[in-house]
């Protein structure tokens, strides 16, 4: 068997916990730590604090096999490990810039807990702007006088398939301070058969942002083209089919709809805009990516108004409250502005999501949450499909016609086939 590493994971959020379970399932010995006591307790009992496909089973197995344990003190996490992953969040400040507070605190706490002379590798997995590992993490370890190596290893996990992505990555980026650090991390990832790119620290940090900026820009570009297609009266799908014959254009992430949400694209693009501007370069294209995304949801509501006129007193079914299907994450979900705008226009909104109702109820409490798609559609004058849950893609024209008062449907995620929507006034963007 490949070398077994002892890995500490600091921060048991979606990225940290998924990474912990993946390393454990690859045979490594993993110690998890989080400052949130409730989260530690839940994970110890085998309950992920959020929904992620396959994670609960993987976590339970790792705990049972004693490859993963959760400790209550950072001292124990540091003492028991040779490689320490920092997986804490890097939220946005009100001005869009990145808040390094949680990363600073986690690195400081690692440095304080490090009481022996053992050399350890500290790896920043949190999404951080170029230069952060060098300007925030390194000085804290240096000040503590501990023998450390430092690396940046960005994650490319998609919520809803994060464990799969962690177990079978399509690339691994290792930003390192020396060839020795690269060797340690290559050994850790030995079971992953994919390209490994070794870079310096800043380049690895930049790869993460450049990737998310490109993907978010693709989505906004798809939305822009689809909006134009609406004006031309042409079908975006047909146009994309032709476009994708160009080998230089990959059709993935060119699905138009009500805009991107989630904990990554909006936050990361905003952080790039804020830091670029602060450094004397205003990234106007990325500003436009965000601005278009902010407006895009309104097109779905405009379709409803076109069909129904005034929305006062109209009952609208909002299907999908999470930012996309297969997750309970409501961060930056487009369902939020959609619901708020509908309510502001006097509509009564019935919301349903297979996993995200609890989180959503705190964001827009005025939405009437119901327990099924059928309940949401019953007696509705209109419907907006906001998240691409697999359960929604099975909806038929008969469902809409049979349940709704007015079968007006806006597919905001392109999951239904318009050709099969006979008798439904069906719209999608593009
Ligand atoms: C994204 C990236 O895809 C991951 O590679 C990255 O690791 C992660 O951010 C991160 O930085 O941690 P995620 O936020 O889970 O992953 O979601 P995506 O599947 O990328 O979707 C983001 C948003 O864009 C969703 O609202 C989705 O509905 C929307 N989208 C995506 C579109 O509107 N059109 C598309 O063609 C694709």
Image (cartoon, helix red, strand yellow):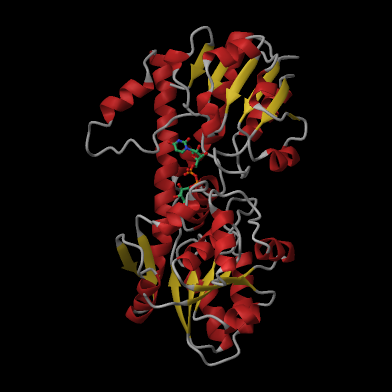
User: Would you say residue 388 is visible in this rendering?
Assistant: no
Residue 309 vertical position relative to residue 216 in the rendered view, above or below: above
Q: Is residue 215 visible?
A: yes
Q: Quadrant of the N terminus?
A: bottom left
Question: In the shown orientation, is residue 294 left or right of residue 230?
Answer: right
In the displayed structure, would residue 360 be above or below residue 427? Answer: below
Please, is residue 1 above or below residue 160 in the view? below
- Residue visible at 73% across and 66% down in the picture: 37
Residue at horizontal 43 percent and vertical 62 percent from the top: 205
Left or right, 45 with reference to 416: right
Percent position of residue 98, x then y: 57, 57
In the displayed image of the protein, which residue is found farthest to the top? 423
Q: As displayed, is residue 143 above or below residue 29?
A: below
> Horizontal and vertical percent for residue 389?
54, 34
The C terminus: image quadrant: top left
Residue 126 appears at what percent x and percent y? 52, 62
379, 142: nearer the viewer = 379
- Between 48 and 95, the one lying in front of the other is 48
- Front residue of this view, candidates 258 and 44: 44
Residue lying at 37% horizontally and 18% vertically, measured from the top left: 235
């Amino acid at each position: 068997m490949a070398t077994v590493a002892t890995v500490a994971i600091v921060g048991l959020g979606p990225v940290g916990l998924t990474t912990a379970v993946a390393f454990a399932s690859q045979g490594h010995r993993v110690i998890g730590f989080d400052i949130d006591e409730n989260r530690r307790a839940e994970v110890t009992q085998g309950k992920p604090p959020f929904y992620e496909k396959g994670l609960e089973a993987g976590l339970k197995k790792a705990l049972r096999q004693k490859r993963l344990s959760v400790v209550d003190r950072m001292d124990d996490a540091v003492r028991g490990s040779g490689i320490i992953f920092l997986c804490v969040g890097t939220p946005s400040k009100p001005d869009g810039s990145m808040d390094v507070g949680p990363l600073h605190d986690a690195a400081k706490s690692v440095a304080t807990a490090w009481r022996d002379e053992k050399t350890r590798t500290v790896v920043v997995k949190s999404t951080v702007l170029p230069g952060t590992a060098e300007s925030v993490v390194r000085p804290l370890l240096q000040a503590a006088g501990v023998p450390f190596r430092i690396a940046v290893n960005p994650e490319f996990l998609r919520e809803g398939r994060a464990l799969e992505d962690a177990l079978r990555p399509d690339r691994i980026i290792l930003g390192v301070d020396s060839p020795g650090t690269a060797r340690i991390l290559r050994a850790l990832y030995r079971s992953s058969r994919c390209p490994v790119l070794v870079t310096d620290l800043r380049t690895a940090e930049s790869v993460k942002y450049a990737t998310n900026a490109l993907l978010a820009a693709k989505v906004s570009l798809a939305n822009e083209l689809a909006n134009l297609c609406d004006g031309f009266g042409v079908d975006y799908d047909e146009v994309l089919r032709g476009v994708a014959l160009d080998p230089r254009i990959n059709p993935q992430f060119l699905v138009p709809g009500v805009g991107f949400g989630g904990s990554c694209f909006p936050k990361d693009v905003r952080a790039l805009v804020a830091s670029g501007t602060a450094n004397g370069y205003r990234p106007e294209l990325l500003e436009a990516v965000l601005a278009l995304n902010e407006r895009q949801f309104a097109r779905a509501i405009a379709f409803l108004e076109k069909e129904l006129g005034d929305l006062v007193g109209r009952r609208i079914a909002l299907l999908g409250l999470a930012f996309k299907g297969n997750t309970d994450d409501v961060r930056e979900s487009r369902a939020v502005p959609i619901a708020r705008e509908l309510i502001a226009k006097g509509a009564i909104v019935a919301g349903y999501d297979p996993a995200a109702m609890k989180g959503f109820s705190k964001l827009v409490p005025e939405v009437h949450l119901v327990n099924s798609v059928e309940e949401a559609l019953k007696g509705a004058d209109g419907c907006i499909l906001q998240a691409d849950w697999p359960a929604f893609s099975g909806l038929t024209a008969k469902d809409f016609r049979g349940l709704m008062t007015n079968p007006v449907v806006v597919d905001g995620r392109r999951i239904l086939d318009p050709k099969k929507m006979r008798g439904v006034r069906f719209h999608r963007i593009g």
